[in-house]
Structure formats: structure tokens, C-alpha cells
Image (cartoon, helix red, strand yellow):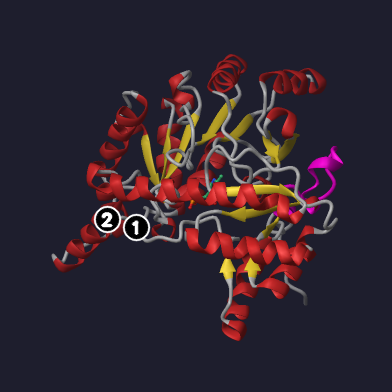
Amino acid sequence: MSMRVSRRGRVEPFHVMELLKAAHERQVSHGDVITMCAGQPSTPAPMVAREAAVAALQDGAVLGYTPAMGIPALQQAIAEHYTDWYDLQINPNSVAITTGSSAGFTALFLAAFDAGDVVLMTRPGYPAYRNTLQALGCRPVELECGPDVRFQPTLAMLQEWTSANGAPPAGLIIASPANPTGTVIAAEELAAIARWCEAEGVLLVSDEIYHGVTFAEDATSAWSTSRAGVLVGSMSKYFSMTGWRVGWLVLPDHLVRPIELLLGNLNICAPAISQVAAIAALGPQARPELQAHVERYAANRDIVLSRLPELGVTRWAPADGAFYAYADVSHLTDDSTRWCDEVLAGTGVAITPGADFAPGSGASAELDGARWVRISLAGATAEMGEAMDRLAAFAR
Ligand SMILES: Cc1ncc(COP(=O)(O)O)c(C=O)c1O
């Protein structure tokens, strides 16, 4: 008898994981790989965070289950982080510590949306939103956000969508800076959208996990305008702690208790030692090290963007932040997944196909992910020039 696999469980693959596997194999066989496909810093956690973890281990700290909402000192440190960065006063009890922001999204979607609910996101956009919503029986709907709107949604788009569909969506996810494009939504547009969402009863999920990694103006928080939405944060990106798995949600009152119950059931708690390290990483001592990473990402961005024309590339997203260059390679391929495999085989440089972020055929051929690639800028600056030399030679 054949065993059943649920329809909900059949999510799209995340091609970058396949590429990482292929890159690893190539490194073993050729030893020449430059990895520009992973969305993670190439640096360890800040020294003070590592020291805090070592001290906890050496002191024999129990490191058992923490409260489902996280260690109170970490909730407090995150509340203070909002005062420090955005001049916002946040009740620490509104902060839920999660196992990376990824686990926060699962709990949040469960707490806020019912099966069948429509949640809007951008195309191109972060694939796990779509896949997680789908696995939970919700209906992710992509808004085509191209170069004309700097790859971010606008209030006009939401109003238009709502009048075309006769009712507003249940939710809207905005990531700023965004993955894969790195674009930051204009502060006044985010504010207008946040006000509209509150007025229309739409849950705004503001993914702010790349905050801190911006190259011109700082990104603004959605809670600077409306506290009806949810803020998503993470230790993964600016704080250089991807594998430690600590993220957080800042919640409006009505979602605090449902999230606490869901987190307690789904995860029990985020890793205790990582929470201890996160408290240290949020402190002032880590700042010089973390700011140096941002300066390196900016230098890497300048190198990669300035050399994209050597590949014949004429169009890319304005990378205001995060650590990605999202480039149109339609003059080189109409199948970015295959092309990225060929690039890896031909050059040893691993980059990510846009198909991960805008799969299938959307309304606009221009945004079809099969025509775009994402290049991660999070590595060592010395590698950027070498990678661009190899990519340019391959494109020629
Ligand atoms: C936009 C965005 N949101 C959320 C995540 C999840 O990150 P984490 O679970 O490490 O906090 C990522 C990871 O790449 C991302 O790019």
C-alpha cells in the first residue's frame, strides 16, 4: 500500500539549498568555490556573544527550557533595542522570542490567519512566506513589484487589489530591506500602507530582519506609524548569528497570548544558549564589530554593481540594504536555474537563480525569476573582484 503525503506538505523546493549542495561537492573536487548564493554573513557571531555562550557553558548554567516567550532579559534587551534604534517604547511582554524569525512566521500565520485567508506578498519575494502560508492552507497572493515601484508594494496597488477583489486581504507581508532585491520601502509609503492596513483590518507583517544593514538612509519601523501590525526581527542578519536560531516578533496585544500558546506547543522555546548570546550581541560592545560588517557589505555592493555591466547586465535592483544584488540576466538565459548550475560548473562561483523568488509565470514576463539571479554580497571583499572576473569571462 502506498503511504500518503499531504497536499499541504508539497511545497516548492528552495533551489539555493540544491546549489549549496552542488557548491560543496565542487569545493571537494576542485577547491575553487566562491559562495555567493547563501543569504548569510560569512562572519561568526560578535565576540561578546561567543564569550557569553562560553561563560554560560563554563559556569554550568542549566540552559534548560526557557519561558515560551523567551528569557525575560532578552525580551527586555529587544525592547531597549527599539528605543535605541527607533525611539519607540515597547512593552517587553509584547516581544516573543522565536527559533529564528522563521519559526515566528509559522506561529504568526497560525495565530492570525485561517485556512483560505489571502495574504499578499511581493513578487519577487522571499519564498518561505509563500511556502509556509501554502503549507498552512492560506492563500499567498503575489503583487507584481517591478523596477517602476522599486520592487516594493504601494498603497495604490493595495487599493486597486482590494477594489478588484471586492474585499481587502487578511494580511500583507512587507520586507524592507527586501530579499532578494535589497530595496527599502520609502518611509512615507510604509506609513501610508500601515495606516491603510489598520483602517481596513489587514494584518501588516513587517519583516524588518535586515534592518541595520542599510547603505544610505536607515529603514523605518512600521510601529513608528501603527502598532496594529506585527514586527519581525532576527539575530540572523545584522547580528551575524544565522545558525544560532534566534528571532523575535513584536506583537499587538490581541496576538500576544495566542502566540505564547502556539510557541509553547510548537517549539517550547528558542535555544537557551543562543538567547544568552543574543543578549550580549544586542549590547553596545558588539556594535563596532557589527558596523564593520555593514561597511564591508557596502564595499562589496559597490564592487559587484559597478562590474555587472561587464556581464552585459544593464538592469539590477537598487540595493539600498541587505546583502544582495538582484540582476536581470535575460540577455544570457531564459532559465536562471540551469544557468546558475552552468555558472557553478564553469567558474566555481555559486549564485542563486531568481526562480527561487519569482517562480512560475507571473503576470509580468519582465519579473519572471527565470530571467534574474541573486548574488550575495555577504562574503569577503577580496572574493568579490575574483568572482566578478570569473563571471565576466563566463558571460563573454
Ligand atoms: C526576508 C527574510 N525573512 C526571513 C528570513 C528567515 O531568517 P531567520 O529564520 O534566520 O531569522 C530570511 C532568511 O534569509 C529572509 O531573507
Q: Secondary structure at mark 2?
A: helix
The residue type indicated by label 2 comes to: Ala
Residue lying farthest to the bottom in this orientation: 29
Q: Residue 334, position in %: x, y?
A: 85, 55
Query: Residue 3 occupies which quadrant of the picture?
Result: bottom right
Mark 2 crowdedness (10 Å alpha carbons): few <14, some 14-19, many ≥20? many
| Foreground pick, 304 / 203 | 304
If the image is split into quadrants, where does the C terminus sit? bottom right
Q: Are marks 1 and 2 in contact (CB under 8 Å)?
A: yes
- Residue beneath disc 2: 49
Rounded to the nearest whole Å, what is the CA distance between mark 1 and mark 2?
Answer: 6 Å
Q: Is residue 9 above or below residue 207?
A: below
The residue type indicated by label 1 comes to: Ala
Specify the label residue 102 is tagged with: none
Query: Residue 16 occupies which quadrant of the picture?
Result: bottom right
Specify the label residue 45 is tagged with: 1
Q: Residue 373, position in %: x, y?
A: 71, 54
Query: Image point 20% across, 66% down: which residue?
Result: 57
| Foreground pick, 167 / 258 | 167
State which region is magenta: 354-370
Query: Image point 66% across, 43% down: which residue?
Result: 125
Q: Residue 321, position in %: x, y?
A: 52, 40
Seen in the image, is 263 located left or right of residue 3?
Answer: left
Q: Residue 50, position in %: x, y?
A: 27, 60
Q: Is residue 349 above or below residue 118?
A: below
